[in-house]
Image: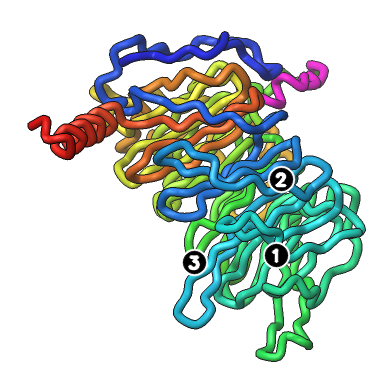
């Protein structure tokens, strides 16, 4: 594979380098052999949102929102209006008559919310002077409503009319939200998940939101919250907890925890964990394909099967530093990016030999209900899991010189990544690009009667 080096690759986080896989130059299963670097931001780029089959938007700490063509790399629009960093961004689609529309909703530290038209670059709607900046956004497509979460939860219609809101929350505020069945919403606030029920009428004037349950089973702040399917959702915490919840009655289906240390001998003083050790066990990101959940835990990857309620594959040291974003692809591949500046491709493969037991304490405690403190402090070995597989490294994309924040995947056009180095990179299939260049040359010669 042809490698493109734009800058030095050093671990960007606090985690020290450890022994990780090295794949080398020859990567026959990696089709991303060409890249295109997109410049336009003046500070770190934190967010990428896919608009349609060929366009995406980027945003970050410079307050800019840029719209790009993923195929050509052309900058289509520059959306200016926020005076501080972007804190959240999402696409919002609706239908007017027979026409489909897709806009972009952005939230900023300047305590404003804006709706943008990516076709024209115009700011269609805006709300300012909020009590606090929104940290997350959630679109309820079925109800044609959207929600902003921060120190309060606000429900909005397409015209940016505030329909209702909750009372002021703690300083931690709402950091993540997912939609649940029966017009319910799960919102992560520090160690708790708050379930809200939305009552919406056709007139929208008497729309109400009320709290119906608080889930207090996490022992530390929640870092990730995702919807798995119509029956389940999952949350991950700062101390390595992974909880799978029932989406209908909000009961715990499975509680798993990564333990940091073996049980200490009786009488030995308690060992306080360093911030580095805590970082190694923190659930940084969760992703799902509706059947499995991949958990980015420190620098490791763990693939959990929801129906089997167990780990099916893992890599304890998948990157040199903390993993920030992951994705499961339909063809059995997995993507991950890290603070170390790399983007890695993984393939789920059968083990040729009997599987090595998973690390002590990882996914070894299966309980239903709130775990006891005593149980949480005891390490157990994972029961032997039949069919345990391995994550095989198939590609290592080196191009960023800073921490890679996230990526979006286009089925036909490739992979787009963003980083603290202010760059956006479009990774493309070299074979596909070569074929397009040959075809373009053929048509050019044909037009000029060269053939």
* Residue occupying the far left of the picture: 451
From the top left corner, tell me how far across and down residue 355 is, in percent.
34, 26
Q: Which residues are magenta?
A: 268-279
- Residue 277 belongs to magenta span: yes
Front tag of 3 and 1: 1
Contact, mark 1 vs mark 2 (Cβ under 8 Å): no
Which residue position holds label 3?
Answer: 230
Look at the numbered disc 2 and give the secondary structure of its residue.
strand
Find the distance from the CA under tag 1 to the CA under tag 2: 34 Å
Look at the numbered disc 3 and give the secondary structure of its residue.
loop
Which residue position holds label 2?
Answer: 222
Find the distance from the CA under tag 3 to the CA under tag 1: 33 Å
Query: Label 2 neighbourhood size at 10 Å, few (<14), some (14-19), many (20+)?
Result: many
Which residue position holds label 1?
Answer: 124
Query: Which residue is found at the position 69% from the left and 83% from the top?
Result: 200
Task: Name above or below for residue 227 compared with residue 82.
Answer: below
Query: Label 3 neighbourhood size at 10 Å, few (<14), some (14-19), many (20+)?
Result: few
Tell me if residue 220 can be seen.
no
Contact, mark 2 vs mark 3 (Cβ under 8 Å): no
From the top left corner, tell me how far across and down residue 110 is, in percent.
86, 48
Q: Is residue 441 left or right of residue 252?
A: left
Compare marks 2 and 3 and give the one earlier in the sequence: 2
Q: Quadrant of the C terminus?
A: top left
Query: Which residue is found at the position 51% from the left and 50% from the top?
Result: 50
Q: Quadrant of the N terminus?
A: top left
Find the distance from the CA under tag 2 to the CA under tag 3: 21 Å
């Amino acid at each position: 594979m042809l490698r493109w080096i734009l800058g030095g690759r050093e671990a960007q986080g606090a985690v020290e380098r450890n022994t990780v896989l090295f794949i080398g130059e020859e990567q026959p299963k990696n089709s991303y052999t060409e890249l295109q670097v997109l410049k336009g931001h003046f500070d770190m780029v934190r967010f990428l949102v896919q608009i349609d089959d060929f366009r995406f938007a980027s945003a970050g700490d410079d307050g800019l929102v840029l719209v790009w063509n993923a195929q050509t790399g052309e900058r289509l629009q520059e959306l200016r209006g926020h005076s501080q960093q972007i804190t959240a961004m999402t696409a919002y689609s609706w239908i007017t008559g027979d026409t489909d529309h897709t806009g972009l909703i952005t939230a900023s530290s300047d305590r404003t919310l804006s709706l943008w038209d990516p076709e024209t670059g115009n700011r269609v709607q805006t709300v300012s002077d909020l009590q606090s900046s929104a940290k997350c956004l959630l679109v309820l497509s079925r109800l044609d409503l959207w929600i902003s979460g921060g120190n309060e939860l606000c429900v909005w219609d397409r015209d940016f009319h505030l329909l209702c809101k909750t009372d002021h929350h703690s300083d931690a505020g709402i950091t993540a939200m997912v939609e649940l069945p029966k017009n319910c919403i799960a919102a992560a606030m520090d160690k708790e998940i708050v379930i809200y029920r939305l009552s919406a009428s056709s007139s929208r004037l008497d729309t109400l939101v009320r709290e119906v349950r608080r889930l207090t089973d996490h022992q530390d702040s929640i870092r990730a919250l995702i919807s798995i399917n119509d029956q389940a959702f999952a949350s991950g915490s700062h101390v390595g907890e992974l909880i799978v919840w029932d989406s209908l009655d909000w009961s715990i289906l499975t509680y798993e925890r990564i333990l940091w240390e073996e049980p200490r001998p009786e009488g030995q003083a308690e060992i306080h964990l360093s911030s580095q050790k805590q970082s190694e066990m923190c659930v940084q990101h969760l992703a799902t394909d509706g059947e499995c959940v991949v958990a980015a835990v420190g620098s490791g990857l763990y693939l959990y099967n929801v129906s089997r309620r167990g780990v099916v594959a893992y890599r304890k040291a998948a990157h040199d530093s903390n993993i920030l974003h992951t994705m499961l692809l339909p063809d059995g591949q997995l993507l991950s990016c890290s603070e170390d500046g790399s983007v890695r491709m993984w393939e789920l493969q059968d083990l040729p030999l009997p599987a090595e037991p998973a690390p002590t304490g990882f996914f070894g405690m299966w309980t239903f209900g709130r775990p006891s403190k005593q149980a949480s402090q005891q390490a157990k070995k994972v029961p032997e899991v039949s069919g345990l597989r391995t994550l095989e490294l198939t590609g290592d994309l080196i191009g960023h010189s800073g921490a890679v924040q996230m990526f979006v995947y286009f089925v036909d056009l490739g992979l787009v990544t963003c980083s603290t180095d202010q760059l956006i990179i479009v990774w493309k299939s070299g074979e596909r690009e070569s074929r397009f260049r040959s075809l373009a040359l053929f048509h050019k010669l044909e037009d000029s009667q060269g053939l």
